[in-house]
Amino acid sequence: MKTQELQQSLSDILEKVDDVVVDYLIPNAKKWDTERAFPRENLAALGEEGLLGLMIPKELGGMGGTPRIYKEVVVKLAQACASTALVYVQHTSAASIMLYGKQQPYISEQLGLMAQGKRLATIALSEAGSGCYFFLPVSQAEKIDKNFRLNTNKTMVTSAGEADIYVTNSKATFAKNSMQSNFYVIPKEHPGITLGGIWEGMGLRGNQSAPMTIDCQLDEEMLIGKEGEGFKIVRESLLPMGQIGISALNIGIAKAIYEESVSYVKKRFYAHINTNLSNFQSIQQIVGEMKIICDQAEKALDTVVLKLEQNQLDMVSTLEIKVMACQAAMQLADLGLKVCGGYAYSAHSPIERYIRDSKAGSVMGPTPEVLKELIGKIVLDVPTQL
Ligand SMILES: Cc1cc2nc3c(=O)[nH]c(=O)nc-3n(C[C@H](O)[C@H](O)[C@H](O)COP(=O)(O)OP(=O)(O)OC[C@H]3O[C@@H](n4cnc5c(N)ncnc54)[C@H](O)[C@@H]3O)c2cc1C
């Protein structure tokens, strides 16, 4: 696509996102958080605008969006309602894994339904045995003729029970280690999916995370790609899209805290000395620091996105961005509390929700500790085997 066309397509899509944000996300963000309720109306509205198919190719009925457009959309969603943004990111991550098998009739049919907004997807990968290394499953499938028998417990699944499609993983039937894994697509109506109780997380409370047991037989058409290709799928599809999505989500949270803090500082007036909070030099410095942190993290993400669009996946920068974005969200949470005081501490202000939301990214695999270790290994020429 030419630059001008790309620019036009970006602004058209962002206009659609703005409409959904204004009509649906902003008015009810507090409600989803307080009631720990799934933001289904928001997802329906995104589906109606075609945005559930943003990253699905046009030939499958999607918008054929670029990583840059995806990043911009997620930042906007997260600024308004981070729970909705997480559900959207997990849906898009599931789509990115499925795209690896887009030549397979069953998978392309499911992708087509997702593009039309008729099916919401998610990823059900994490297991107790490998925790935040969710890309290294310990459960193993058995082969029965051409089909698979799977019995696995997934510890945390966003949109659990709400999504229509679950992309899950296990070790391949012949695997000697977790690197040889399989990804599968399982529709909600498939027998053998049982939900555990809701996982009452600190933040992102509208994402309906729950444990899930998957104990069933799967037809060979539900396998994405070939047996044992799981790690290749992680490296080529899930890693870049997952890192962009979760980083954009955290940058959105950081920007939301920044904007709310600036607005508060400008308004806060001290009658006893007849001045505004914004006139204190130390407050000006903190606000300056908040701006620098947000800008640096977003610029780093933009650089990765640009390289990806030029088909130059830079592994270290791709690993770095999630660390930087999660740090940005948590630093902004601390600084926001510092400049907004009791206003930020109270559930009456959105900052209190953003502070809780800012913690999730660092708990989600691959965690910043795991990413830093991998970056260190690459820099030091040490094998990256985990
Ligand atoms: C809001 C939210 C939504 C989620 N949604 C999904 C979903 O949709 N699908 C899904 O599959 N999973 C999901 N998860 C799960 C997530 O991706 C992780 O797998 C899970 O949070 C890991 O939790 P754990 O307690 O098992 O971590 P553990 O593996 O027990 O890790 C505990 C701590 O040890 C640290 N650690 C681990 N290795 C090292 C090391 N080498 N050096 C230093 N420190 C280390 C980690 O950084 C972490 O802080 C979600 C999690 C959250 C918080």
Image: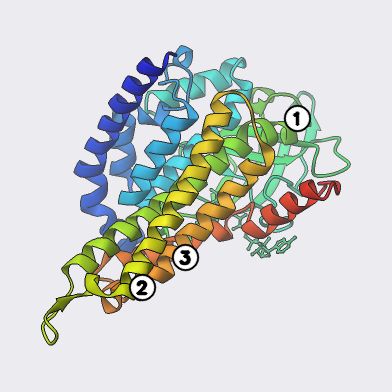
Q: Secondary structure at mark 1?
A: loop
> Image height check: is 365 above or below 65?
below
Q: Earlier in the sequence, mark 3 or mark 2?
A: 3
* Residue type marked 1: Glu
Per the image, the residue denoted by label 2 is 337
**Res 355 visible:** yes
Q: Which label number is shown at residue 229?
A: 1
Residue for point 74% across, 46% down: 136
**Circle 1/circle 3 CB separation < 8 Å:** no
Mark 1 or mark 3, earlier in chain? 1
Give coordinates of residue 355: x percent, y percent: 40, 66
Label 1 and label 3: CA atoms lie apart by 38 Å
What amino acid type should be assigned to the residue bearing mark 2? Leu
Q: Position of residue 22 (x, y in %)?
A: 21, 43
Q: Nearer the viewer, residue 365 or 218?
A: 365
Is 47 left or right of 233, judged from the image as shown?
left
